[in-house]
Amino acid sequence: MQTAQGRVVGHQDAVVGPSTRRAFGQQSIVEFVASDGRSLRFTDDVVRQLQAVHDVGEKVTVRYPANDPSKAEISSSSMVKVFIGAVLLLFSGIGLVLGWLLLRLSPKAPTGTSTA
């Protein structure tokens, strides 16, 4: 991965959420110069409701694969994704532990009663 300084040049409207609860948000459009001298522009993956994460004109650090600068992303956006992933993983683990405890602590049904 390589890094470069980029600048937010605009915002793009986006719709987020499931079809039953649609919400409007904005994504940042970033322009940067790759190490090979090409000027590239991309739209950040992170969508924020009501307003974009970054202001127009704000300088941001861009990360991109050296062999494909068109797959660039804002560095702070990748940290947001990692944080959200970690929180989801934590809650999944808690859910698994609670489910296991409920199964272990539930009363057992009597097994086969004999009437003699």
Image: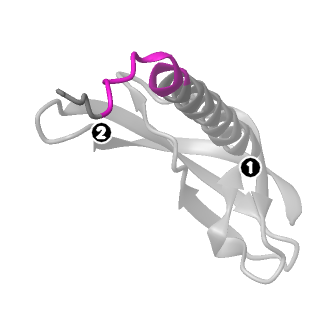
The x, y position of residue 116, in whole percent, is: 18, 28
Label 1 environment density (alpha carbons within 10 Å; few <14, some 14–19, many ≥20):
many
* Residue in the picture at 21% in, 40% down: 18
Which residues, given as a range, are shown in magenta? Answer: 101-111
* Residue in the picture at 50% in, 16% down: 105
Under circle 2, the secondary element is strand
Q: Is residue 62 found left or right of 85 in the rendered image?
A: right
Position of residue 5 relative to residue 76, above or below, is below
- Count all numbered tags in the image, as a single digit: 2
Front position among marks 1 and 2: 2
Residue 56 visible in the displayed image: no
Residue type at mark 2? Answer: Val
Residue type at mark 1? Answer: Gly
Q: Name the residue carrying label 1.
A: 6
The x, y position of residue 79, in whole percent, is: 73, 38
Position of residue 40 relative to residue 25, above or below, is below
Q: CA distance from mark 1 to mark 2?
A: 25 Å
**Nearer-the-camera pick, 40 or 79:** 79
Q: Is residue 110 magenta?
A: yes
Q: Is residue 108 magenta?
A: yes
Q: Name the residue carrying label 2.
A: 16
Residue 4 image-quadrant placement: bottom right
* Residue in the picture at 31% in, 43% down: 14
